């Protein structure tokens, strides 16, 4: 078992709805703006549920859920003490009743994930190998935590993949349960996407082969099993996939790994006194799992030494549910140069950046006059995050205040510093006139519109195996329940929700009818944000994306081209990237053919 010390790091029945009465027609274009199955205006005319009714219903459901756990019908081994956690989480003053831990920050060095460039094969392809296995990691100083990781105890190596080069990645599962590995942001066929249909059984292996022709970008990989994605990622399974096209080096951008090109994987975790990971230990965690310990590359609040020159941070919000409002102490500015799926057209000066789960951003910091000083990267959450939801319990104490993440200690410059170019990349504009496909996002409010019966049916629906079979007995939480939906449809692996024509360009309109903001992610493609509530997006959102953060009562239009095939056996997913929402209904499937 790997240890980490001191921060080391097949037929598919097709329907438009999950009800048996609404079969999907055979017309492959029926979904494209000609079908009105869910009129957004109708959903807005439904009776409004008052906040106190919402909270009261959740409290009642929480009591039943906790009792069910104690009787062995839910999460195996949970105790009745959870009643207090479930109830206190419903008080309207935060989802987890967490307090700020007593910790001396910035005492341990930031772990830098090892790079893997692949082994050149006789056929000219590059071969990589990833092994998913249990281990123990020192996420908190002096505390050993049972975890899962790729090629180590926690997280995984950074896979460097050249643009246009065929690759073969061998995935081996040494865990005690089946899982998958999804290549988030990669333009690959559905059968290589690593979605929930691509399970790897314990002791088994799988080869994924593909060639990436998209722009250079900071992508990532993580598990994607239906109903268990949140638990498997929380246990430690995630890593960076760095697609290289040579543009960044030709521009003179910082690119020395671990020196002036720093990976920053942000996560939050809840960890018991004995070091075990605590996952979904209260009813409120279904709104999104948040922790009170803040990790960067698997280490709590570390420091990193960086040279007094332009320094590049590749930031991934790898948290299950937490939103970060990234800022530098003293309101120092930084330059954003890339979003999820590639470089922007030009740098954008910013003083804060809201980053939702699954989103990435590349930031350049000007440290040329700061030798001998230190800076703090933090989340100024209180100014933005509480307003993302109409339900007070969705925000915890850290969302309402803020917290430090990483200290940067500025040392002497290197001999070959990078630079900030005025122009970065050419971002071709996708047509804004194309077939329109509509999506609406629903949350707990829609479920409660059906009354207490609908609330209880959603809370007590299907369960994803449950049990405390995660690392060190970590709970796998609860999944496959009907809590959150897209187009009033809940995830069903036997249902294809949308069908897209291969080679087509479409406009996807995503409207958020829920009580909170949701990060919307689509597999197999990248998109461009055309508008937010009819207005042009800000400059930093005018590049390639694969996750868009949609606020409540907001409508976002996206343009995407679909050049990768996905058949009935291996469709692509679209879903909320709050993993507990994805695991509990907020996901759909689409084919591209």
Image: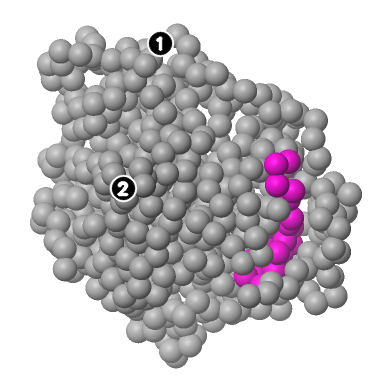
Marks counted in the figure total 2
Q: Does residue 461 appear left or right of residue 12 in this picture?
A: left
Which residue is at the front of the view, 277 or 448?
277
Image quarter (top left, top right, bottom left or bottom right) of the N terminus: bottom left
Q: Residue at x 24, y 31 (%)?
A: 257
Look at the numbered discs 1 and 2 and tell me whether their residues touch, using CB distance below 8 Å.
Answer: no
| Residue located at (27% from left, 32% from top) | 262
Does 529 appear above or below 185?
A: above
Give 264 or 243, whichever is nearer the viewer.
Answer: 243
472, above or below 140, in the image: below
Q: Which residue is mark 1?
A: 421
Q: On the rendered structure, is 208 left or right of 391?
A: left
The residue segment tinted magenta is 483-504
| Label 1 SS | loop
Residue under numbered circle 2: 122
Q: Secondary structure at mark 2?
A: loop
């Amino acid at each position: 078992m790997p240890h980490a010390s001191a921060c080391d790091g097949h037929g598919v029945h097709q329907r438009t709805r999950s009800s048996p009465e609404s079969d999907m027609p055979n017309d492959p274009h029926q979904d494209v703006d000609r079908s009105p199955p869910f009129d957004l205006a109708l959903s807005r005319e439904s009776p409004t549920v008052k906040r106190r009714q919402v909270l009261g219903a959740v409290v009642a459901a929480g009591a039943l859920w906790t009792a069910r756990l104690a009787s062995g019908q839910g999460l195996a081994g949970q105790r009745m003490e959870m009643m207090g956690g479930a109830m206190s989480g419903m008080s309207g003053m935060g989802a987890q009743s967490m307090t700020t831990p007593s910790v001396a920050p910035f005492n341990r060095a930031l772990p830098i994930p090892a790079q893997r460039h692949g082994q050149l094969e006789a056929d000219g392809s590059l071969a990589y190998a990833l092994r998913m296995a249990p281990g123990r990691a020192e996420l908190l100083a002096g505390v050993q935590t049972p975890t899962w990781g790729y090629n180590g105890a926690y997280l995984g190596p950074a896979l460097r993949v050249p643009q246009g080069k065929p690759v073969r990645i061998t995935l081996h599962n040494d865990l005690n349960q089946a899982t998958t590995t999804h290549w988030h942001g990669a333009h690959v066929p559905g059968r290589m996407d690593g979605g929930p249909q691509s399970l790897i059984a314990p002791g088994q292996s799988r080869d994924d082969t593909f060639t990436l022709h998209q722009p250079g970008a900071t992508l990532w990989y993580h598990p994607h099993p239906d109903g268990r994605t949140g638990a498997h990622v929380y246990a430690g399974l995630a890593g960076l996939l760095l697609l290289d096209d040579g543009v960044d080096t030709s521009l003179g951008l910082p690119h020395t790994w671990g020196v002036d090109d720093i990976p920053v994987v942000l996560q939050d975790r809840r960890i018991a006194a004995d070091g075990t990971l605590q996952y979904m230990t209260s009813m409120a965690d279904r709104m999104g799992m948040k922790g009170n310990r803040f990790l960067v590359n698997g280490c709590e609040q570390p420091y990193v030494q960086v040279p007094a020159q332009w320094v590049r941070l590749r930031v991934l919000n790898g948290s299950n549910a937490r939103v970060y409002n990234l800022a530098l102490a003293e309101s120092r500015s930084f330059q954003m140069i890339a979003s999820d799926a590639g470089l922007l057209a030009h740098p954008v000066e910013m003083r804060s950046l809201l980053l939702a789960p699954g989103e990435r951003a590349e930031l350049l910091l000007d440290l040329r006059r700061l030798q001998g000083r230190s800076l703090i990267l933090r989340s100024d959450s209180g100014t933005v995050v509480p307003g993302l939801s109409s339900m007070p319990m969705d925000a915890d104490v850290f969302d309402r205040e803020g917290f430090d993440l990483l200290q940067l200690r500025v040392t002497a410059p290197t001999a070959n510093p990078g630079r900030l170019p005025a122009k970065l990349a050419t971002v071709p504009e996708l047509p804004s006139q194309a077939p329109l496909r509509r999506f609406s996002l629903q949350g707990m409010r829609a479920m409660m519109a059906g009354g207490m019966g609908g609330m209880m049916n959603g809370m007590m629906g299907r369960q994803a195996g449950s049990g405390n079979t995660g690392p060190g007995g970590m709970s796998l939480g609860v999944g496959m329940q009907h809590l959150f939906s897209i187009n009033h449809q809940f995830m069903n692996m036997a249902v294809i929700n949308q069908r897209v024509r291969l080679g087509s360009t479409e406009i996807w309109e995503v409207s958020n009818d829920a009580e909170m903001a949701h990060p919307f992610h689509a597999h197999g493609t990248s998109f461009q944000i055309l508008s937010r509530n009819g207005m042009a997006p800000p400059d930093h959102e005018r590049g390639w994306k694969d996750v868009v953060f949609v606020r409540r009562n907001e409508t976002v239009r996206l343009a995407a081209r679909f050049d990768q095939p996905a058949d009935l056996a291996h469709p692509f997913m679209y879903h909320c990237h709050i993993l507990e929402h994805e695991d509990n209904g907020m996901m759909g499937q689409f084919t591209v053919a």
